[in-house]
Image: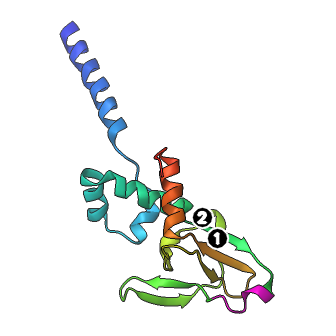
């Protein structure tokens, strides 16, 4: 009986340790990437997965601006995943539950891109690739 209890306890401890290794991937990534692709990154390229998870939280900012400054700012559109092109115009966003991967945007190497949210004074700012990579590296304590 003591052996059974010892083996049972050992299995419980091992399964608990293995469960800690299972990564909880941000479900917002499934908007743009397949489960298979995410699983491949988990196994073969976890840094890429870290980068995408960082991007969905930190690769942008939503700001309020005076309407007169928004006249020449392009409008924000959803991404049509089937055609991989611009979908419907965005009329509002839920800033608390924002998912960057729902939208059609470009990330410039050197300059932030701005997209106006129609009917509002809000702008989605997509950080430049340079700024985004610097932020990511800083979050991981990498040197520039």
> What residue do we see at 80% from left, 89% from top?
68
Q: Quadrant of the N terminus?
A: top left
Circle 1 sits in a helix, a strand or a loop, which is it?
loop
Q: Are marks 2 and 1 in contact (CB under 8 Å)?
A: yes
Task: Name the quadrant containing residue 113.
Answer: bottom right
Is 53 inside the magenta-drawn segment?
A: no
| Real-space Cα separation, disc 2 to disc 1, in angstroms | 6 Å
Q: Is residue 142 left or right of residue 14?
A: right
User: Which percent across, then down, holds residue 4?
Assistant: 20, 14
> What residue do we see at 21% from left, 17% from top?
7
User: Which percent across, then down, holds residue 97?
Assistant: 60, 64
Residue topped by disc 2: 97
Q: Is residue 69 left or right of residue 117?
A: right
The outermost residue toward the top is 2
Q: Is residue 123 above or below residue 75?
A: above
Residue topped by disc 1: 94
Write the start and end of the magenta stretch as one range. 68-73
Q: Is residue 38 above or below residue 73?
A: above
Circle 2 sits in a helix, a strand or a loop, which is it?
helix
> What residue do we see at 74% from left, 83% from top?
120
């Amino acid at each position: 009986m003591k052996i059974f209890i010892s083996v049972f306890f050992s299995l419980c401890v091992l399964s608990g340790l293995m469960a800690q290794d299972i990564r909880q991937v941000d479900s917002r990534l499934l908007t743009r990437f397949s489960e298979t692709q995410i699983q491949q990154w988990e196994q073969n390229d976890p840094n890429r997965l870290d980068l995408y998870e960082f991007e969905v939280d930190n690769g942008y900012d939503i700001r309020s601006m005076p309407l007169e400054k928004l006249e020449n700012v392009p409008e924000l559109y959803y991404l049509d995943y089937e055609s991989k092109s611009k979908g419907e115009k965005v009329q509002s966003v839920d800033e608390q539950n924002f998912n960057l991967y729902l939208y059609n945007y470009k990330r410039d190497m050197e300059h932030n891109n701005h997209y106006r949210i129609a009917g509002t004074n809000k702008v989605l700012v997509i950080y430049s690739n340079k700024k985004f990579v610097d932020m990511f590296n800083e979050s991981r304590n990498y040197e520039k």
